[in-house]
Image: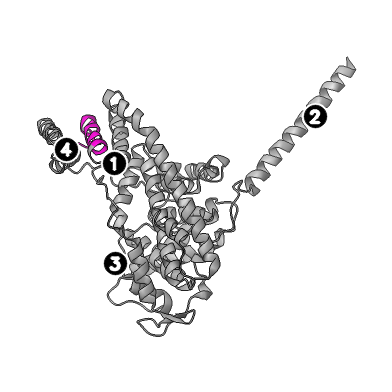
């Protein structure tokens, strides 16, 4: 009997020791855990110039700079990069601004009559009139599953736009899960669209590999610096900043104020530059946690609202028709967000998808009173830089499309937002490829032309 008691005591002691070790290991692991993602060498890290690399000009306009014994005007390079960001003449823009819109409402009879007229024009081959009526029907009845489904069929069959059609079928099922026609259509298109999205990511990887090789040939300082200014210009421009890129560049290079522009606009630019410098430091960090996210926000908003910068919100906020979680839930939601951000599940995704979802999830929580969009875009770019991709630039001209994709994600379909970020990534790769080709001494081969014109 005594032996049994001794054995049981020993076993209990061993179990207690093991539990204590496991608890200690778990605690230490949470404090010092490292990211499991195998980051590539951040080739594009120096696309963000360090503070001591910026030249201080004494006059405006800025002086011309030399590049390999040829003279290049900063404004000419800047103009060329801006032009490269514009869609080409063969790029077809799809209209989806009605998605999630609730600005217009129509009576049931008006919606029915508009839809029937659109179908009639479609059957008679009058596609332009049919398009206008389908758009109107979707605008006055954005939650009508019949309208969304019929509009999707028109886009798929007459416009060959299967991606937007698939989004509309999904949306129809969001509002009417048992809609048989939408179910059948979605079953047919979902796999095709998934394949197209996969091809888009492959195209991004091909261009990214090509750009890495181009950057190995030379430093392309003119391209890097002007793209850096464009990045800040578009990022603050989305939020309503009215400075031109030339004025912004003048502010950052000289430290002088720009006449006619508000203090807030100056401070938004200065804060974003500080945040981008911080992002450059974080590229070598293996873990993105709450401390890092608060550090980004503190720099973004430090000049604009120092009392609330780097602090979670303590009030309820509204973002259009979207109501973010209560401020009481923000700390725990941010803990969960950081757990996901550093999880193997997230980091095993394609980096562009991972970055886009990290952006959306943070915007959805909306942890700060202001500066959520800028902070989310910086975290998105931090992830891309870590994975060996250049930082993405969302143009101020894409503001409406950007917010439409976020609204659609709020309705349950995050794919259009991921697709939007992927298209922006492709767009920025094209811009850099154009810039490196422009300033390359060796010219460009036929094979490289094929990649550029993918």
Q: Which numbered tag is attached to residue 137?
A: 4
Question: In what element is the residue under mark 1?
Answer: loop
Report if the CB atoms under discs 4 and 3 are less than 8 Å apart.
Answer: no
Binning the other alpha carbons within 10 Å of mark 3 as few (below 14), some (14 to 19) or many (20 upward) gives some
**Label 1 or label 2, whichever comes before in sequence order:** 2
Q: Nearer the viewer, mark 3 or mark 2?
A: 3
Report if the CB atoms under discs 3 and 2 are less than 8 Å apart.
Answer: no
**Label 3 or label 1, whichever comes before in sequence order:** 1
- Residue corresponding to mark 1: 161
**Label 4 or label 1, whichever comes before in sequence order:** 4
How far apart are the two marked residues, 3 and 2, measured between alpha carbons?
69 Å
- Residue corresponding to mark 3: 242
**Label 2 or label 4, whichever comes before in sequence order:** 2
Q: Residue at x 47, y 47 (%)?
A: 202
Whether residue 295 is visible here, answered yes or no, is no
Q: Magenta span: helix, strand or loop, mainly? A: helix
How far apart are the two marked residues, 4 and 3, measured between alpha carbons?
35 Å
- Residue corresponding to mark 2: 13
Q: Nearer the viewer, mark 1 or mark 2?
A: 1
Query: Can you name the residue that lies furthest to the bottom here?
Result: 58
Binning the other alpha carbons within 10 Å of mark 1 as few (below 14), some (14 to 19) or many (20 upward) gives some
């Amino acid at each position: 009997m005594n032996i049994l008691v001794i054995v049981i005591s020993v076993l209990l002691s061993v179990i207690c020791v093991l539990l204590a070790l496991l608890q200690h290991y778990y605690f230490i692991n949470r404090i010092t855990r490292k990211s499991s993602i195998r980051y590539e060498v951040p080739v594009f890290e120096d696309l963000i110039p360090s503070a001591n690399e910026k030249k201080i000009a004494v006059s405006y306009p800025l002086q011309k700079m030399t590049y390999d014994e040829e003279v290049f005007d900063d404004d000419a390079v800047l103009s060329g990069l801006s032009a490269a960001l514009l869609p080409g003449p063969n790029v077809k823009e799809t209209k989806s601004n009605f998605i999630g819109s609730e600005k217009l409402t129509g009576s049931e009879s008006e919606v029915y009559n508009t839809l029937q007229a659109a179908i009639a024009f479609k059957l008679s081959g009058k596609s332009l009139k049919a398009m206008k009526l389908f758009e109107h029907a979707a605008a006055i009845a954005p939650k009508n599953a019949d309208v969304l489904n019929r509009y999707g069929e028109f886009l798929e069959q007459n416009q060959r736009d299967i991606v937007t059609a698939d989004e509309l079928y999904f949306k129809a099922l969001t509002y009417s899960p048992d809609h048989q026609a939408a179910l059948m259509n979605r079953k047919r298109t979902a796999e095709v669209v998934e394949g197209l999205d996969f091809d888009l990511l492959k195209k991004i990887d091909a261009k990214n590999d090509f750009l890495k090789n181009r950057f190995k040939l030379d430093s392309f300082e003119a391209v890097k610096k002007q793209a850096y200014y464009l990045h800040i210009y578009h990022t603050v421009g989305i939020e309503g900043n009215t400075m031109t890129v030339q004025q912004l560049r003048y502010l950052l290079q000289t430290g002088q104020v720009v006449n006619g522009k508000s203090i807030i606009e100056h401070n938004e630019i200065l804060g974003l530059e500080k945040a981008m410098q911080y992002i450059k430091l974080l590229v070598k960090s293996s873990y993105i946690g709450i401390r890092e996210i608060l550090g980004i926000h503190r720099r973004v908003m430090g000049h604009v609202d120092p009392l609330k910068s780097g602090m979670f919100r303590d009030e309820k906020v509204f973002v259009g028709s979207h109501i973010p979680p209560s401020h009481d839930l923000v700390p725990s939601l941010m803990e969960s967000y950081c757990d996901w951000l550093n999880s193997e599940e997230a980091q095993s995704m394609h980096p562009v998808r991972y970055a886009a979802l990290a952006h959306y999830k943070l915007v959805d929580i909306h942890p700060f009173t202001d500066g959520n969009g800028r902070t989310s875009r910086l975290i998105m770019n931090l992830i891309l830089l870590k994975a060996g991709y250049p930082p993405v630039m969302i143009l101020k001209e894409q503001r409406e499309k950007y917010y439409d994709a976020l609204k659609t994600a709020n309705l349950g379909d995050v794919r259009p937002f991921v697709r939007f970020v992927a298209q922006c990534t492709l767009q920025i790769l094209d811009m850099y490829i154009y810039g490196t080709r422009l300033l390359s001494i060796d010219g460009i081969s036929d094979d490289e032309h094929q990649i550029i014109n993918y």
